[in-house]
Image (cartoon, helix red, strand yellow):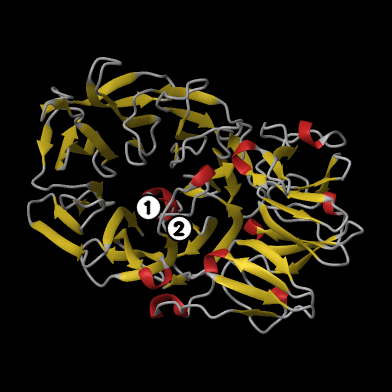
C-alpha cells in the first residue's frame, strides 16, 4: 500500500503482518540502485505489481520500480512537473503528479498522469507515449479516438482481461472506457446547467466587451450549482456611472478545500481571490486559476488562452510581461506532503520559473516598476510563528524588506502608482508585543517609514476579551495626491475612511464597506456591503464623493455572494 504521509510503501502478508517494503520515511528523491527501504520517496500515491512480483510506485514526478530482490530504480519520469517525452525513453519523460497505474498481460504499464490530463503508456521496452487524453482539461471525445479526449484530473486506471482500460475521470464524475482500438466512451452522468453547458472545456464561458471606453467596475459573484457539486464563478463588468452589466467570464470552481495529507480541491479564493491584481496593465485581459490551471481571458475578444501552467492566486506584473502565481510542490518533511512556492511565467509564452521556494498559500502583489513582488513567507525554523510579509526581487528571488505583524489576507497592502511607497496594514493584539493597529507607508528603496493611519485604541475589550480593530483595503486615490481610502473593521462593524496624508484630516464616509476601491477617476468609491453573519459581500454599491448619493449595482439573491471588486479605465 502507498503510505503517502509516511513516505513509504508498506506490505501486509496474508497472515496480517505489516512491514516497510520501500521508502525510508523521508520525503525526497534518492536511493536509485540501492535497497528500496533506504530510498527517499516523494509522496507515493499509487502502486501496481506485475505477475513477476515487480512493484511500481507512482510518486510526485516519477514512477519508481522495485525488483523482487528489493533494489529500487526510476522506471519513468525525470522529476519535472510538466509534459514531455512521448516517443522516447520513459526515464527522460516528464510526468505531472501521476496517480493510479495498471498493467496489461504484455507488461505495458498505464499511468494516470493526473495534472497532464492524460493516460501515459510505458512499453515493456521502456518507451513512453500518450494512450488517452489530449492534455486539455474538460469533458470531450466520447465515441472518438482516445488521444483526442479530454479529462479532468484522471486519478485511477484498471484493465480487464479483454484489454479494455477503465479511467477514473475524477472531476468529470465519470468512469471512462478505452477499448483496445482506442475509442473512448463514458458512463452516464448529470448534465451541466444551461449557463455553462455549451461552453468549451473546462467550462469557460466568455462574452467579449469589445472596444469599450470610460470607467468600468468589475466584480465577482459565486453561485452554487449543487446539481454538479460546483460553484459557478461569474466576473461581471458594468460602467461605473451605471448601465447594463455583462458577464464577461464564467467558470466552475470546486466547493471545498481540505482533506487528508494536504490534498485539496480548488475553491473560490484560488479561482478569483482579488480582482485588481488579475488585470493586465491596460485592463483588457485578465488571468484566472481555473481548475488549478492559469488561463488568460481577452476581455475585448472573449478569447481564452491557457498558459499550460498549474498555479493559484495569479497576479499580473505592472509592465504586462509576466504573471506571478503560487503553486504546490512536494516537501521533504514526513509531517506534510505539500508546500507552496511562488513562480513567474512570461505572458507571451515560455517556461515558468520558481522565484521563492517557500510561501504562504496566498496572493502576491507587484511593485509599480515590476522589479519586486510582495508576499507572505513563513518564518524559517519556527512552525508556530505567523508569517512575515517580504519583498522579493523578480530577477534573482532575493528577499528584501520583511514586515512582521501584517494583518494578513490579500487586501492589506497597496503600492502607490509611480512611487516606491507601499501602504501596508500592521496589527498586533495580544501579549507578544505592544498593541497596535495602523497603516504605515514604507519607501521600499530607502526603507524610510511613516505612519499614515493610527488607531488610538487598537485592542478594545468586548465581552471579556480583547478584539483587534483591523485596518484593511488601503487604496491610494489615483487622481488625488496623498489621499488614502481604507476600511476599519470592528468585528462585524465596518467603517470607511478617507485620510489626506498631507493635512492629516481623516473623514469617515457615510457608507459601511466590507471591501472598497476608488473608481479610476477618483470621483467615487465602489464597495461591497457585508450583511451580519455572511461570509461574503451581499451587494455592490457606488458612493459619489460629491455628495450626490449612491447607487446599488447588484444585490445578491438566494445563495449568491459577491466576493471582490476592481475598477478599470479604458
Q: Are marks 2 and 1 in contact (CB under 8 Å)?
A: yes
Label 1 neighbour load within 10 Å: few <14, some 14-19, many 20+: many
Camera-nearest residue between 441 and 540: 540
Element marked by disc 1: helix
Residue 18 placed where, x, y %? 69, 40
Camera-nearest residue between 172 and 460: 172
Q: Please report the residue visible at 59 percent of the width from the left and 47 percent of the height from the top.
A: 345
Q: Please report the residue visible at 48 percent of the width from the left and 64 percent of the height from the top.
A: 298
Q: Please report the residue visible at 46 percent of the width from the left and 78 percent of the height from the top.
A: 190
Residue 375 placed where, x, y %? 45, 34
Along the horizontal axis of the image, is 135 left or right of 421? right
Figure check: 409 above or below 101: above
The quarter of the rendered structure image containing the C terminus is bottom left
Along the horizontal axis of the image, is 472 left or right of 22? left
Camera-nearest residue between 260 and 77: 260
Element marked by disc 2: strand
Numbered label attached to residue 275:
1
Numbered label attached to residue 286:
2
Amino acid at each position: 500500500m502507498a503510505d503517502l504521509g509516511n513516505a513509504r510503501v508498506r506490505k501486509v502478508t496474508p497472515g496480517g503482518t505489516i512491514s516497510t517494503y520501500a521508502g525510508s520515511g523521508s520525503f525526497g528523491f534518492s536511493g536509485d540502485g540501492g535497497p528500496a527501504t533506504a530510498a527517499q520517496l516523494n509522496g507515493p500515491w499509487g502502486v501496481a505489481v506485475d505477475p513477476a512480483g515487480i512493484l511500481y510506485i507512482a510518486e510526485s514526478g516519477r514512477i519508481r520500480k522495485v525488483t523482487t530482490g528489493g533494489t529500487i530504480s526510476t522506471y519513468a519520469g525525470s522529476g519535472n512537473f510538466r509534459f514531455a517525452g512521448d516517443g522516447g525513453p520513459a526515464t527522460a519523460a516528464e510526468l505531472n503528479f501521476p496517480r493510479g497505474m495498471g498493467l496489461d498481460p504484455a507488461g505495458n504499464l498505464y499511468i494516470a498522469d493526473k495534472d497532464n490530463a492524460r493516460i501515459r503508456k510505458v512499453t515493456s521496452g521502456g518507451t513512453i507515449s500518450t494512450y488517452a487524453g489530449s492534455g486539455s482539461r474538460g469533458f470531450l471525445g466520447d465515441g472518438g479516438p482516445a488521444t483526442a479526449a479530454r479529462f479532468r484530473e484522471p486519478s485511477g486506471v484498471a484493465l480487464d482481461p479483454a484489454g479494455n482500460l477503465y479511467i477514473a475521470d475524477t472531476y468529470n464524475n465519470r468512469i471512462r472506457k478505452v477499448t483496445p482500438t482506442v475509442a473512448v466512451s463514458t458512463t452516464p452522468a448529470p448534465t451541466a446547467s444551461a449557463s455553462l453547458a455549451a461552453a468549451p472545456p473546462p467550462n469557460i464561458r466568455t462574452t467579449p466587451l469589445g472596444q469599450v471606453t470610460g470607467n468600468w467596475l468589475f466584480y465577482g459573484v459565486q453561485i452554487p450549482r449543487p446539481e454538479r457539486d460546483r460553484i459557478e464563478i461569474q466576473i461581471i463588468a458594468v460602467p461605473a456611472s451605471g448601465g447594463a452589466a455583462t458577464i464577461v467570464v464564467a467558470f466552475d470552481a470546486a466547493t471545498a478545500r481540505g482533506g487528508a495529507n494536504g490534498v485539496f480541491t480548488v475553491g473560490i479564493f484560488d479561482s478569483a481571490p482579488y480582482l485588481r491584481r488579475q488585470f493586465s496593465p491596460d485592463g483588457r485581459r485578465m488571468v484566472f486559476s481555473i481548475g488549478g490551471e492559469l488561463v488568460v481571458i481577452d476581455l475585448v475578444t472573449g478569447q481564452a488562452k491557457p498558459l499550460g501552467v498549474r498555479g493559484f492566486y495569479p497576479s499580473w506584473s505592472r509592465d504586462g510581461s509576466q504573471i506571478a502565481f503560487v503553486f504546490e510542490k512536494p516537501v521533504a518533511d514526513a509531517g506534510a506532503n505539500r508546500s507552496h512556492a511562488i513562480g513567474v511565467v512570461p505572458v507571451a509564452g515560455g517556461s515558468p520559473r520558481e522565484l521563492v521556494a517557500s510561501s504562504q498559500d496566498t496572493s502576491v502583489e507587484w511593485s509599480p516598476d515590476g522589479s519586486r513582488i510582495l508576499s507572505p513567507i513563513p518564518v524559517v525554523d519556527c512552525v508556530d510563528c505567523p508569517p512575515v510579509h517580504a519583498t522579493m526581487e523578480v530577477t534573482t528571488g532575493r528577499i528584501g524588506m520583511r514586515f512582521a505583524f501584517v494583518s494578513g489576507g490579500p487586501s492589506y497592502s497597496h503600492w502607490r502608482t509611480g512611487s516606491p511607497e507601499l501602504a501596508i496594514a500592521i496589527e498586533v493584539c495580544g501579549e507578544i508585543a505592544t498593541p497596535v493597529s495602523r497603516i504605515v507607508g514604507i519607501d521600499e528603496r530607502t526603507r524610510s517609514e511613516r505612519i499614515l493611519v493610527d488607531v488610538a485604541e487598537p485592542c478594545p475589550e468586548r465581552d471579556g476579551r480583547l478584539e483587534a480593530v483591523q485596518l484593511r483595503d488601503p487604496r491610494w486615490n489615483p487622481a488625488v495626491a496623498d489621499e488614502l481610502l481604507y476600511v476599519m473593521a470592528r468585528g462585524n462593524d465596518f467603517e470607511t475612511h478617507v485620510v489626506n496624508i498631507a493635512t492629516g484630516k481623516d473623514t469617515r464616509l457615510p457608507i459601511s464597506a466590507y471591501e472598497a476601491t476608488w473608481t479610476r477617476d477618483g470621483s467615487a468609491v465602489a464597495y461591497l456591503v457585508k450583511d451580519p453573519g455572511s461570509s461574503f459581500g451581499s451587494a455592490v454599491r457606488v458612493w459619489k464623493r460629491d455628495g450626490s448619493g449612491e447607487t446599488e449595482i447588484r444585490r445578491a439573491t438566494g445563495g449568491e455572494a459577491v466576493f471582490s471588486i476592481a475598477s478599470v479605465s479604458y
